[in-house]
Amino acid sequence: MPDLDRDAYAIVTKGLTKRFGKILAVDHVDLTIKKGEVYGFLGPNGAGKSTTIRMLCGLLDPTEGTGYVLGHDITKEPERIKEKIGYMSQRFSLYEDLTVRENLDFYASIYSVPNGIKQTRIEQMIQMADLTGREGQLAAHLSGGWKQRLALGCSIVHKPQLLFLDEPTAGVDPVSRRNFWDLIYRLSEEGITIVATTHYMDEAEHCDSLGFIYQGRLTAQGSREEIKANALKGGVLEIDCEPMREATQVVEQLSGVAEAVRYGNTMHVVIEEGGPSPAEVETRLTGEGIKVNRAELVTPSIEDIFVSFVGLADRRSLRAQLKRMREGGV
Amino acid sequence: MRSRLLGMMRKEFIQMRRDRITVAMMLFMPMIMLSIMGWAINTDVKHMPTAVFDQSRTPESRDLLHAFTNSQYFNLDYYVDSYEEVTRLIDSGHAKVGIIFPPDYARLLKQQRATQVQVIVDASDPLVATSAVNTANAIGQVGSLRIASEMLQRSAGRVPPSTPLDVRVRAWYNPDMLSAIFIIPGLLGAILMQTTITIIAMVVVRERERGTLEALIVSPLRRWELMIGKIAPNVLMAYAQMTIALIFGVWLFDIPVRGSLPLLYFLSLFFIMGTLGLGILLSTLAKTQHQAMQMSYFIFIPSIYLSGVLFPIEGMPPLARTFAYMIPLTYYLQILRGIILKGIGMSYLWTQFLVLTAIGIILISASILRFRKKLG
């Protein structure tokens, strides 16, 4: 790996692989994450997001491959990396029997924040997390959003250069999720590189760059605009018609159609490059005796894009998985 | 780094302080355990089933038997006709005491010669044995005095044997007559072992269960800092517990502390380090606090039985004795009893000290290594 890469990027991995027995949890992942960006690592549960993050943090040793975090080899210098990064897991890692201030104080001391600036730093964190007045409350008594912000405070009290967020918004209400992302932007403006995993596809909108991971493989990676511009050249067609079930069957038979899925009260038809035009699809449906109220090209959702990178055979199950998680989450 | 270790220790102390129930349990357990044992031990055991083999069958022998009955400690339930029957009754547990008069008991007394009455006590139950032996001895002495004075009155000048009646008490099964004094220091060791192993295992497993351990591993906190940070507060807690048990033992049971307390506290450190290491080792095996608890019992129970808390190891079969010498508690008990009861010094305890140190180093290193693997 050339030195140039290591300096320009916060994280570079080459063929990063993790096997648990026979299970291939992470399969030759090549990540490139630029300094200062907000990188969203997207994928359904069990896709390998957390395992990848854990390897990057030095929690797990890779089975194969290399990785550099802030210029340090993840297998050779994990301790150097640990000093410079922050890590917040979906479980928040708070001590429920410690107060807000005690939690911050503890994390500040294990990250060796010098005594001279420790108190100032803790005050800053309390302000940032909007926990003023609750310093003496036990973490156990905080509600979800506050816990989440306190956990964030604990993971950045030492001012890391790089912050890993592993499913930071899982199980938190939508308002808190939005507030949380606002905080993340502010951190990003201060120059901290942020790598966040999430299975909420809509949270991709908060990221500068995206990486899609499915079944241990990185299926796509790049800036959000790049991915949006290059993916799904054929477009996504939103059709409002009746009856929906028959319509879906008809459309799926058409050549040049990747998939047709129910999307609320409408149907989303993912069309491959050079596939049928909206008019062609509509004609075909009308020909089959289906009443079409509306058929128009729409901006593909991140989910549509994600799914389009996955092999045809897996798309249906991935859709189902993402739907389950969307509904299972808050 | 000092700040990391201090931070870790401070956190552990705060958590310990907040967990009032556990602290209370740790501090009250020695008191409760010792009181229960003490209450059981101090209760005089009365009306012990007794087998009598009276080969004399004379007013003199019946006289002495009356003294036994009147003491209320002995119920003369069985009158038998052979020594074998006495043995059988005691072996089967039907009788706790056997009294045997020789055939020439009355004749010897009449001839103003010394005679012997044998009292056999089932001492496998030290509680029974203590009272039986003491009472029988007392009866023997009182009887002896009475007979001697009668002899004096009758002898007119001839000097009778100084103790004409010799009640020979033999404690079976437990010839050393182990009792409270023997058991209390053992109990102290056992309580210390159980609480240290359990508490540290639970504390570490709790970190894993709640996901905070992950945060510690991602932090620059070194593994040894994590370990020492966990161990140090627990060592202090163990010392507090030990002090309470000692004070209680001295106050309630008059346990004599004959040796050097500083030496006892110093040597205890190495035992505690070992048990804490073992606790951390367990925490790497257990997935939940519940499992950790059960595992600690799995270690605790054999330790209690094999280390000599209740029965001396010298009386164990060879295989059990081999196991006994593999248990840290065995060595610690030798230190406890040696210092507390015998008042011996370091020069007699080098072996125990070295063995405990070795076990401690092995257990703590193993727990650190195992800890690394678990997360690596």
Image: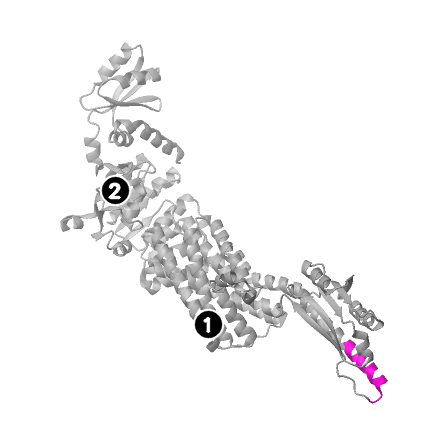
Assess disc 2: are there few (<14), some (14-19) or many (≥20) residues with their C-alpha within 10 Å of its C-alpha.
many
Label 2 secondary element: strand
Q: Residue A296 sits in which quadrant? A: top left
Decide if residue B216 is on the left or right side of residue B32: left
Q: Residue B63 sits in which quadrant? A: bottom right
Decide if residue B113 is on the left or right side of residue A324: right
Q: Nearer the viewer, mark 2 or mark 1?
A: 1
Q: Position of residue A243 (x, y in %)?
A: 35, 15
Q: Position of residue B150 (x, y in %)?
A: 83, 81
The amino acid type found where label 2 is placed reads Tyr
Assess disc 1: are there few (<14), some (14-19) or many (≥20) residues with their C-alpha within 10 Å of its C-alpha.
few
Q: Position of residue B71 (x, y in %)?
A: 78, 69
For the question of whether residue B283 can be seen, the reply is yes
Chain where mark 1 sits: B
Q: How many discs mark residues in the rendered view?
A: 2
Q: Position of residue B366 (x, y in %)?
A: 38, 59
Which residue sits at x=28%, y=11%?
A286
For the question of whether residue A133 can be seen, the reply is no
The part of the chain drawn in magenta is B142-157
Q: Nearer the viewer, residue B193 or A246?
A: B193
Label 1 secondary element: helix
Chain where mark 2 sits: A
Q: Main secondary structure of the magenta part?
A: helix
Residue at the spot of label 2: A39
* Magenta stretch encompasses residue B150: yes
Decide if residue A316 is on the left or right side of residue A134: left
Residue at the spot of label 1: B266
The amino acid type found where label 1 is placed reads Phe
**Residues at discs 2 and 1 both on one chain:** no
Decide if residue A207 is on the left or right side of residue A105: left
Q: Residue A284 sits in which quadrant? A: top left
